[in-house]
Image (cartoon, coloured by chain):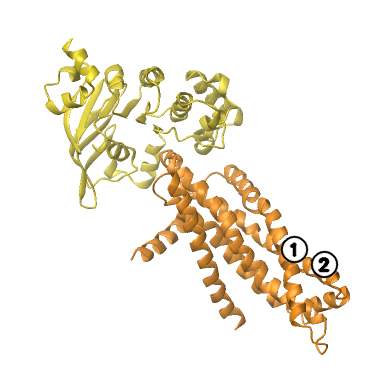
Chain colours: A orange, B yellow
Amino acid sequence: MKYLRDIGKYFLMVKLSFTKPCKKNILYRLVFKEINDLVLDSIPIVSILSFFIGGVVSIQMALNLESPLLSKTLIGFATRQSVILEFAPTFISIIMAGKVGSYITSSIGTMRVTEQIDALEVMGINSLNYLVFPKIIAMLMYPFIITFSMFLGLLGGLLAMTLTGVPSEAYIQGIQMDFDIFHVTYSYIKTLVFSFILATVPAFHGFYMKGGALDVGKASTQSFYWTSIIIIIVNYIITQLLLS
Amino acid sequence: MIEIKNIFKSFGKSEVLHDISARFERGKTNLIIGQSGSGKTVLLKCLLGLYSFDQGELIYDNVYSSKMNDEEKMNIKKEMGMVFQGSALFDSLSVLENVRFPLDMLTNYSEKKKNEIALKFIERVNLNDAINKLPSEISGGMQKRVGIARAIVLNPKYLFCDEPNSGLDPKTAIVIDNLIQEITKEYNITTVINSHDMNSVIEIGENIIFLKEGIKLWQGNNKEILDSKNIEVEDFVYSSELVKKLKKN
């Protein structure tokens, strides 16, 4: 019953975040702040992870495609498919559930504990619109991070292959081989859905948390746990619907 | 003026407020006192509209809250100011930005006018030297004063204070109490203070309501409370050995 009640509460929270909007100039300011905190600040970690994981993926592909009967272009092909279809949108989103999700939960949770949310409510301000809506809008920039991650993942693979001795021409040719634009579309559809989950699920855990400072930490852990699970389940559903 | 008539409030099976009726006068410092768990905070949150009650009537200057639509309820909230127990200042905003916040959110004044109004109230609470400081860079007493300035910046009709001097040393606590009383008189506000501090009760208690286990047991002022003839009130007032000794002498 608790889970059903929480699901209902989550959807009501999402609905309320879109009602009684605050003034446009305030909203612009909040959105730009959130773009900076949630999106731009995530670029360093996404860059490092994408570059090196891209390298590791290509090395593992090369290891598994050692047969002289198999073309070296397959390494680039398989790396591209792994990076674009799964690694960049899903793996990075799970990392972001830890990085962005815990930031959202702890910042909103701390506001709850220190009565800042009550202060907003007493002033007659829709606290959900003020706190959650700018995050949802800011996370619309999330596909740019994923694009960046895809590019760096493939670049990492290229560097790893060059260092391993695989001709870079073969790798690049593999990246271009049998390219299906729908795979990229599928990846961006997933990314947009994940961006909404990344903004709202941690906000839910922060907004409705109860207790003190210790409970903010617990709420952050819960937020990471549920955001990751929801991303994995939604990933399966979207893949089943679009690729099966 | 705020009036409550026969308010009942329960959380699940536990009744927190039982048949409370009271009148909070304009231009007076009205205190709700009682031990922890007596229902003070719940009553204050009912007055603020943060909690709905199960039965009873809440009347703001002859307007019944039960007859208000959502827009009227939102408008009445704009006439309320609240000083929180922990100040509830926005961490990332400076003192000036915190005081200006309600003006930014709820008015269409120019930047210049908003700054002028905010600075006037910052000056009123004697914080001119701290306008650009963050809440973390100022003392607890200063944070309370910022909270008071933010609460009155929109010239509210009603001011609510939840244990405004908790965590403060006695001297600073008296400064905060007196500031609230001065502001109440100066702006003719209906002020309701939630407190369990006897110093506040004696200093500024013009209309005091004593709660115990969700029931209103006594009402009077700071002069009457010292000789209330009510065992429960006397237990609360003279709970400290020091006060008992002072009474004997």
Pointer 2 residue: A159
Q: Which mark is drawn over residue A141?
A: none
| Quadrant of the image containing the C terminus of chain A | bottom right
x and y, in percent, of residue A212 in the image: 41, 44
Vertical side of B31 occupied by B203: above or below: above
Q: Report the side of A163 relative to A194 (left or right).
A: right
In the figure, residue B42 lies in which quadrant? top left
In front: B202, or A186?
B202
Image mark 1: chain: A
Does the image show residue A154?
yes
The residue carrying pointer 2 sits among few (fewer than 14), some (14 to 19) or many (20 or more) residues within 10 Å by Cα, namely some
Pointer 1 residue: A51
Vertical side of B234 occupied by A180: above or below: below
What amino acid type should be assigned to the residue bearing mark 1?
Phe
In the figure, residue A69 lies in which quadrant? bottom right
x and y, in percent, of residue B36 in the image: 27, 35
The residue carrying pointer 1 sits among few (fewer than 14), some (14 to 19) or many (20 or more) residues within 10 Å by Cα, namely many
What amino acid type should be assigned to the residue bearing mark 2?
Leu
Whether labels 1 and 2 share one chain: yes
